[in-house]
Image (tube, helix red, strand yellow):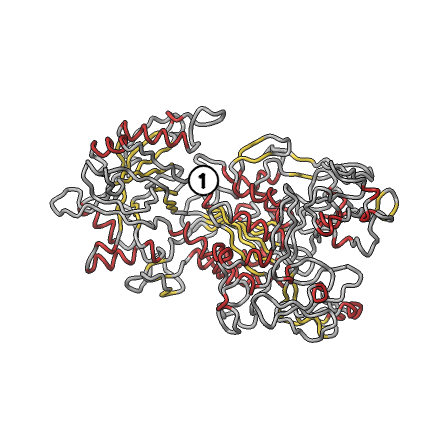
Amino acid sequence: MMLNRKAPKAKSPGLLGRLRAAGAGLVAAATAATLVVGCLDRPVVKQSPHTSNVFVAEIRQTAVDKIDLLFMIDNSISMADKQAVLSDAVPVLLNRLVTPACVDSTGRQTAPTSTNGMCSMAGSSPEFSPIKDIHIGVVSSSLGAHGGQTCVDAAGDDKGQLVQKVRPDAMVTTWNNSGFLAWDPDTQRPRNMPQGETDANRLTTNFKNMVIAVGQTGCGYEASLESWYRFLVDPQPITSVPQVTDPGGSTMPVYDNNPQTNPILQQRAQFLRSDSLLAIIMLSDENDCSIQDAGQGWLVGEQNLGGGAFHMPKATAVCETNPNDKCCTSCAAAPGPGCGPTANDPGCAAPATYSATDDNLNLRCYDQKRRFGFDLLYPIQRYVDGLWETQIQNRDGQVVQNPIYTGSPPRDKSLVFLAGIVGVPWQDVATTDSFPDGAPLKYLTYQQMIDQGRWDMILGSPGDPNTGAPPGLPGDKLMFETPKDRAAMFQNQAHPLIPDAALAPSTATGRPNKINGHESNIADNSDLQYACIFDLPTDKNCDMGATACDCRTMDAQYNRPLCMGTTQTHAKAYPGIRELRVLQQYGLKGTQNSIVASICPKTLSNSSDASYGYNPAVAAIIERLKEALRGKCLPRKLIAEDDPASPDVGKVPCAVVEANVPTNGEACTCTSAQKPGRSDASDELKAAVFRQLNEAGYCGDAMGATPCNQYCLCEIQQFTGDQLNTCQTSPSAPANIYGYCYVDPTTATGDKKMAEEAIVAACPASQKRLLRFAGDGVPAKGSIAMIACLGSTVAE
């Protein structure tokens, strides 16, 4: 069989003159309620007209007021115990978002929750503003047969839709029958739309029930990556894939981009807002198996072909040692340029197809290129691009706007997060002070993972198919995918970090390896070795009808470390290589918005323990989201006017401009009752803004782009006098004045200093200063905000 391969003293004209003389631009900002300002590598200071320049770079300031939270939950067999653990973490997650913790000026937590956005202890404030608009949806890992014979039943295919739309659960009440939950205690929904949930306890209960309702009867080919991609990103989501009947045929998936006929597009339009923070959280205990829907991906699930048993063809010999080699190919395919005939390759010696033992249907997804000479899974880059690129290719080969980045302006890339609670030992992705029993578990940040070499430890190098550079093995061999005894393969190799976690053979008794117990005896190649195991809160008697049990009498031959006789005491997870690789590669894009946690909890014995279940994962996720949720912290100091006789005392030499496109044919105005705190930007400032809008791609002459002259540009006022003092000292942002102020406690004294310290309490230690905006709609949602600041003194 042949396989087809397929911001100055704003009123000062002199400043604008210096702006032009310095050739300065203005840096574009992010989306709705997001501000980008000059990221200053040196202080902005008062200067002589003869020794000044303009220094402009980017600081990302976000003021997120809504979150779209999508969970991808594996619903294959053995996931019920992990789903239960996740449901326990649900209240922790929601409480942190809805009633954020209180922190002092050093960032130390002073109270676990705030009340109505306020903290009772003097000198403390919420770590970020309470989030009052949240969408919560769940998709499963089941995407069906992909044209093959496995997972053809309804339970095996949730079609990439919200689970509560394809199989609603009576215990879950979704918003407006949308399939997702909506937390909306204050916000009025659009006309004719019901308000979202206003009771936090009811929201939590619905969320917990929604997690449990995902179940564990789904397809064993877990499309953990493709499921969220199909729901959020795919411009033409597949609605069905007809089963292939021709042995040499290819799948022809049915798809469309019509929101009237495609359920996913309808659900996406309701769930995903263009001005939200988008967070995707994956929960899976196995590696991703996102099978390609077009071509011959259907072979992964094929059992019988042409009336006989089907087994995958073998691969050329070089695949075993280097799947990136140009001559690594399938024995059923023609050789590549410069490669000898596959018929003469030692790897293709008869029989040219694998036996039933070597090609177990359950294990068709792992290490495909090495084993089969081809890869029938979607490439990792598909998902990295889906998270990052503003334009992607649809199924017809056309370049179109990425649905994640639609809107005007599009969502800022700093507001897209991916988290994975997946198959990796928690020790491999945690701080070393987390290791001792009883120590609180804290996960490493993305940068810490790089600095400590943890990515290479859990993944190894992918090599380079373009140059033929071979992949490298992970430093932790528990992350090596194979059914073979890794203790024998790697001579009982010690764990890179844990002394009592050396590889233990499949003949071992007890659990000599602290992380995965020991290897299993998988002589029939029906399973893979575990990355990690963990204690079940309740043991299961496998011979008494317990479901998803690994310790039946007939399983004794495997000597699994999960078992004590026929009682299952532990749960397991396999290496989540592809999910982790996407997390690694996405983080490299610049935002480092990847969060990694283990699906194997450190402890399940005490729910009040900080290390309990997935609470540490929730803490890691919230810690990473904080930067976007709290907003407006400045890494560089601005020097405000300090002359008491000056009318501009307290102001910084910056100008903030707000740019948006009027709707419904409205005229551009900056002085209306609907736009308090604004004034017309000068012609010089407008020219600079238009240039930057063009350069940043927000407007221009390109096909489909908004003409630059359609933007209305208004300068936001900077407070002085009593309004400045109010802005700088009020515990919550004033609602009855409109503009902004600069808050820096290092320039204040007495009570004013204490008030300012409380305002910046949630900022990182090195960023205890911010631009604070006051008045509803400042800057306007959906606008593009820009700032230019006078730079530091330089020699002429």
Label 1 sits on residue:
190
Query: Disc 1 marks which amino acid?
Result: Pro
**With 338 as the anchor, is 175 left or right in this view?**
left
- State which quarter of the image contains the C terminus: top left
| Rendering coords of residue 399 (x, y %) | 57, 31
Q: Quadrant of the N terminus?
A: top right
- Compared across the picture, whether 161 is left or right of 548 comes to left
Give residue 486's position: percent from left, percent from top. 70, 64
- Name which residue lies at 47% across and 54% down: 447
Q: Is residue 93 visible?
A: no
Q: Is residue 128 above or below residue 687?
A: below
Q: Position of residue 753 (x, y in %)?
A: 23, 58
* Residue occupying the point 38% across, 45% down: 60
Quadrant assignment, res 699: top left
Residue 558 in the image: state x and y as whole percent: 76, 67
Q: Is residue 555 left or right of residue 723?
A: right
Residue 450 appears in the figure: yes
Q: Is residue 688 left or right of residue 550?
A: left
Of residue 20 and residue 686, the one placed in the foreground of this image is: 20
